[in-house]
Amino acid sequence: MAPTAKTALKWAFRVVALVVCLYLALILISVTFMTGQWEYRKTDRACIDVANIRLALGLYAQRYGELPSNKEGLRPLKQKGMLDAVPIDPWGHEYRYAHDGQRTSVWSLGRDGVPGGLGPDGDIGMEWTAWTSPRPGDCEHREDAGGL
């Protein structure tokens, strides 16, 4: 029996519907993948920022003989021209800074802006002493509840 125009039209419609569904599924998968990758790029950006802040703090210490106080935070780095602006992490939060006389820490609280967390919500930063000189690869992505 020869296919009728009506049968051929039904098959054509089914094929087009299948192609459209596959195309939409591909778009959804791509968007999901790119969104996840975007968060990891932000994490990488935070590590680079922390390394740059570490270098700016070293320059500040060389010029002024001490690091900024915890109360001052990172604002003196901008005021003294070590950085163009007070550093903001990729999620829009200010970077955290702590110095106790021996150990210095610079970190981001991650996507959620609160200490601890997992994945992109985890804290990202560096901690060093006056006797160590961290390299940019020393940036840690902390996923425990304690933060840095």
Image (spheres, rainbow, N blue to C red):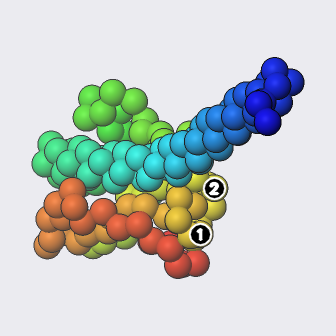
Residue at the extreme right = 6
Quadrant of the rendered image containing residue 98: bottom left
Residue 54 falls left or right of residue 36: left
Q: Are marks 2 and 1 in contact (CB under 8 Å)?
A: yes
Quadrant of the rendered image containing residue 35: top right
Question: Badge 2 is on which residue?
Answer: 112
Residue 56 falls left or right of residue 96: left
Label annotation for residue 44: none
The residue depicted at 30 percent of the width and 48 percent of the height is 48
The residue depicted at 52 percent of the width and 78 percent of the height is 144
Residue 71 falls left or right of residue 3: left
- Nearer to me, 16 or 54: 16
The residue depicted at 37 percent of the width and 45 percent of the height is 45
Q: Position of residue 32 (x, y in %)?
A: 59, 47
Question: Badge 1 is on which residue?
Answer: 117
Residue 137 falls left or right of residue 97: left
For residue 119, say whether it is visible.
Answer: yes
